[in-house]
Image (tube, rainbow, N blue to C red):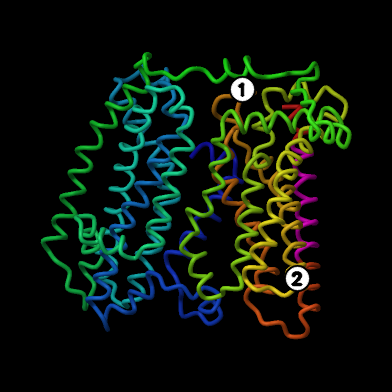
């Protein structure tokens, strides 16, 4: 909480994430134009349906309860696997209180951090469901059920994540790859839950489905099982009693079992780096290296090569490109079914987001080890920003343009629409990198190990803010190429899409770059 008060921009970015999550959970509302903008059914829809079709709502509530526990467990487990709070014991705690109390204190702080996002989204769903039924009594069961789902998911996820982390720590290679393992596991979980309705039905038939009965226990017209309601509340007590000892055991292992500690990444850096006198890593002698060196200069080329080497040594930063899929996959699938011609634009937007998430969303955090040396060289600030931008753009633009071409041809785009899609792909990718630099400078991640061997993963709230901005920038293309029918000729519609997207991307990218440049200038004096 103190960290958010010191950095109000984090509160803004977190609020954006909460709003997006709440909209997805609440679903469509009978509010005129909003119902057409967001037609996906959610908590309000099923609340309104309760009086007409109670058994269907009960079945859906059991699915939602089970899926909610699994989803929150997966997200919390990922946080426990990757959080720096468990890397080593905090001396100010272990010297003042007992070790179990210190572990539970850190656990409480981490769960509170997760609840800043989970609680408002889950609460919005409970309120929307109660509003849909029109019965105030519904709110009691929905609140208790939502709280039980959130607490069970948070506790299960924390103990599971810490247990997996303790096991991975036995191997230095597996422990270094925990970011990749965690993100791939999260991605797989969300894809399975999104694609297969049968998975939801099967989960609802397990004890996890009992939480759905709690959600609708006080809903008129829905005959929930009192036995299942009692079983769910008992399960919550069992989870609480069982997860805390497991968390204490895993915390002790992570903090004090020196035999399981992973090797230092700094050692790998000292063995493999080629560091120049100016604080940047020297560029290789390959054709690409010489071309970037001639085009951008040696300092910028050195920063570019340093970013690529860090990506190869520790690809954990790149695993975060999967986060938009994990969070928005159900919405993307629904939009693809309703507007099949929007698929190429969705694919291009995601790839442009992925390019921006990789190396440019934390420029100050990535360069903070060599930053004092770099800033003393001529054009040092320019080399840091442009070097990270080139590290993203050199492989990113050709990739996004190629995929745009394939996706447009596959979806039956006309030649003029295909050309517009390719230009939009280039504009979104290039402008997105500038936006990424600006948001990364606004919300830098300066925590964790500061070495020249690895990329520092971007701040989660920076990722959410970047995803929101990129969604806005891609809106003209989404409407012009994927949703709306052209009013005039295809050529006129294509020109509008290209001009609108290009102007927005160039403007936003330039503003982002300028902000990042000013942030680096201020960083020198702090």
- The answer to whether one can see residue 95 in this image is no
Relative side of 249 to 494, left or right? left
- The answer to whether one can see residue 319 in this image is yes
Q: Secondary structure at mark 2?
A: helix
Q: Is residue 112 magenta?
A: no
**In the figure, residue 362 lies in which quadrant?**
top right
Marks 2/1 in contact by CB < 8 Å: the verdict is: no
Residue at 60% from the left image edge and 40% from the top image edge:
7
Q: Position of residue 206 (x, y in %)?
A: 20, 57
Residue at 65% from the left image edge and 31% from the top image edge:
366
Frontmost residue, 40 versus 402 = 402
Quadrant holding the C terminus: top right
Relative side of 117 to 266, left or right? left
Q: Position of residue 311 (x, y in %)?
A: 62, 33
The residue tagged 1 is 451
User: What residue span does the magenta drawing correspond to?
Assistant: 501-519
Q: Position of residue 307 (x, y in %)?
A: 68, 32
Relative side of 351 to 85, left or right? right
Residue at 45% from the left image edge and 49% from the top image edge:
187
**In the figure, residue 112 lies in which quadrant?**
top left
Q: Is residue 510 magenta?
A: yes
Frontmost residue, 325 versus 503 = 325
Badge number at residue 237: none
**In the figure, residue 383 lies in which quadrant?**
top right
- Total number of numbered labels? 2
Magenta stretch, main secondary structure class: helix
Q: Secondary structure at mark 1?
A: loop
The residue tagged 2 is 497
* Above or below, comparing residue 188 to residue 380 in the picture: below
* Above or below, comparing residue 70 to residue 180 in the picture: below
Residue at 76% from the left image edge and 72% from the top image edge:
415
Circle 1 packing at 10 Å, graded few (<14), some (14-19), many (20+), is some
């Amino acid at each position: 909480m103190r960290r958010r008060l010191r950095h109000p921009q984090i509160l803004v970015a977190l609020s954006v994430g909460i709003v997006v999550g709440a909209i997805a959970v609440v679903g469509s509302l009978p509010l005129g134009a909003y119902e057409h903008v967001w037609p996906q059914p959610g908590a309000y829809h099923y609340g309104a349906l309760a009086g007409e079709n109670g058994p269907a709502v009960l079945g859906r509530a059991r699915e939602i309860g089970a899926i909610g526990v699994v989803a929150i467990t997966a997200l919390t487990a990922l946080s426990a696997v990757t959080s720096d709070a468990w890397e080593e014991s905090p001396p100010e705690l272990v010297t003042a209180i007992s070790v179990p109390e210190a572990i539970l204190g850190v656990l409480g702080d981490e769960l509170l951090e997760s609840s800043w996002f989970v609680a408002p989204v889950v609460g919005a769903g409970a309120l929307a469901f109660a509003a849909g039924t029109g019965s105030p009594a519904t709110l009691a069961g929905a609140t208790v059920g939502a709280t039980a789902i959130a607490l069970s998911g948070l506790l299960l996820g924390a103990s599971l994540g810490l247990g997996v982390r303790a096991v991975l720590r036995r191997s230095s290679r597996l422990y270094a790859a925990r970011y990749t393992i965690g993100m791939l596991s999260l991605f797989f979980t969300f894809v399975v839950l999104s694609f297969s309705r049968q998975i939801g039905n099967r989960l609802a038939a397990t004890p996890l489905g009992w939480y759905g009965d709690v959600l609708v226990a006080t809903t008129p017209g829905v005959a929930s099982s009192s036995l299942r309601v009692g079983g769910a509340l008992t399960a919550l007590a069992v989870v609480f009693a069982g997860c805390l000892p497991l968390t204490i055991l895993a915390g002790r292992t992570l903090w004090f079992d020196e035999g399981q500690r992973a090797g230092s990444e700094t050692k790998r850096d000292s063995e493999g780096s080629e560091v120049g006198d100016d604080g940047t890593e020297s560029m290789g002698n390959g054709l690409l290296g010489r071309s970037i060196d001639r085009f951008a200069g040696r300092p910028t080329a050195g920063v570019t090569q340093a970013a690529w080497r860090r990506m190869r040594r520790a690809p954990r930063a790149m695993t975060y490109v999967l986060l938009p899929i994990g969070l928005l996959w159900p919405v993307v699938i629904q939009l693809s079914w309703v507007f099949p011609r929007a698929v190429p634009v969705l694919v291009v937007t995601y790839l442009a987001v992925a390019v921006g998430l990789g190396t440019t969303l934390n420029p100050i955090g990535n360069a903070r080890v060599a930053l004092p040396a770099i800033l003393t060289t001529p054009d040092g600030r320019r080399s840091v920003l442009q070097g990270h931008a080139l590290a993203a753009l050199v492989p990113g633009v050709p990739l996004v343009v190629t995929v745009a071409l394939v996706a447009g041809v596959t979806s039956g785009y006309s030649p003029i629409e295909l050309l517009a899609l390719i230009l939009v792909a280039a504009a979104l990718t290039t402008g997105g990198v500038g936006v990424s630099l600006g948001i990364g400078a606004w919300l830098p991640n300066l925590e964790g190990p500061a070495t020249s061997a690895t990329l520092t993963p971007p701040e989660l709230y920076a990722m959410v803010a970047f995803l929101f901005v990129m969604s806005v920038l891609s809106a003209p293309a989404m409407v012009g190429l994927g949703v709306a029918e052209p009013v005039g000729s295809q050529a006129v519609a294509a020109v509008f899409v290209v001009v609108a997207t290009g102007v927005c991307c160039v403007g936003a990218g330039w503003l982002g770059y300028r902000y990042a440049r000013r942030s680096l200038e201020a960083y020198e004096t702090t």
